[in-house]
Image: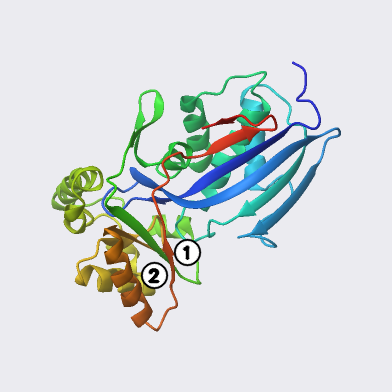
Amino acid sequence: MPPVPAGRTVSVRVPATSANLGPGFDTLGLALSVYDELTVTTLPEPGLAIHVTGEGAGHVPTDESHLVVRAMAYAFEAFGRQLPGIRLVARNSIPHGRGMGSSGAAVVAGLLAAKGLLEDDVAIGDGTLLRLATELEGHPDNVAPALFGGLTIAWMGDDGPQSKKLQVHRGVSPLVFVPDFTMSTSVARGLAPAQVTREDAVFNVSRSALLIAALTQSPELLLAATEDKLHQSYRAAAMPATDALVRALRAEGLAAVVSGAGPSVLVLADGPGQRLVAAQIAADLTDTPWQPLMLAVDVRGGTVKNDMGGSTP
């Protein structure tokens, strides 16, 4: 097959995500209005030129181990194509290591960039994007909302990863509190037990079902719907400040949960007024400075735009 011509440029935009949402462990995810944006241009000769600004600048690698480049190479290889020389300019806004899906966003960004560069040669559909992203990320709960936006339910079926996108009730107002410390996703996952009691399993099944209703139809049920017995309490000792904020918010009737693997805290407020109350509670916990992000639910997911101006999800 002919190589991708030099000078082809695509622009990609991918939202942050929050996974689990309390009881929906490894299943539920929500796309949020914080974005990583990048521009990829093919070069006439092999090689990489990577420039990163914003989150991760000076810390993320600028060689072939960069996660966006790894995802691009993975997609090209999956279709038997050779990755050309690449100039990557990344403008990152999603906090790293804070439970807001930065690694999933990088994987999705690389795959969408590959989709844009290969569009004249290979048609890469949504199902393939989800499969490749899950293979790279390990599980689909972050990559599904990053790809498709909104609230997503993700699961592994006989044919691989699957997802369903749902529209979130307009009364739901997300707020994320971001601390100045990080948490390793692998460490956090290792703290959750391999087995739980039948009672705890039934508890989470009921709350996960209720959470779908609360997020799509009945936001007034969010506090009860975000209760969890599978993972958050087991991770609390590793994130005491996060646990303290979640407890303080929930004591005041606010639906607060650990965002992804933490340490950020997600509040699913029942209207914008609750967000102001939550921000004041966090400000009063002076032991840890929390950056409040007043966000919206992203409904588009990741997009890729070619240099001719076309844009596709």
Report the residue marked by disc 2: 239
Element on which disc 2 rests: loop
Say whether disc 1 or disc 2 marks the residue closer to the N-terminus. 1
- Give the residue type at disc 1: Met
Q: Is residue 303 above or below residue 174?
A: above
**In which quarter of the view is residue 216 placed?**
top left
* Residue 124 coordinates in the image, percent (x, y): 56, 23
* Residue 183's disc number: 1
Three-letter residue code for mark 2: Met
Instruction: Residue 242 in the image: state x and y as whole percent.
Output: 37, 70
Location of the N terminus (image quadrant): top right
Q: Residue 149 location, x and y as percent?
A: 42, 40
Q: Can residue 192 be spotted in the picture?
A: no
Nearer to the camera, 181 or 52: 52
Left or right: where 197 falls relative to 178? left
Q: Circles 1 and 2: CB distance less than 8 Å?
A: yes
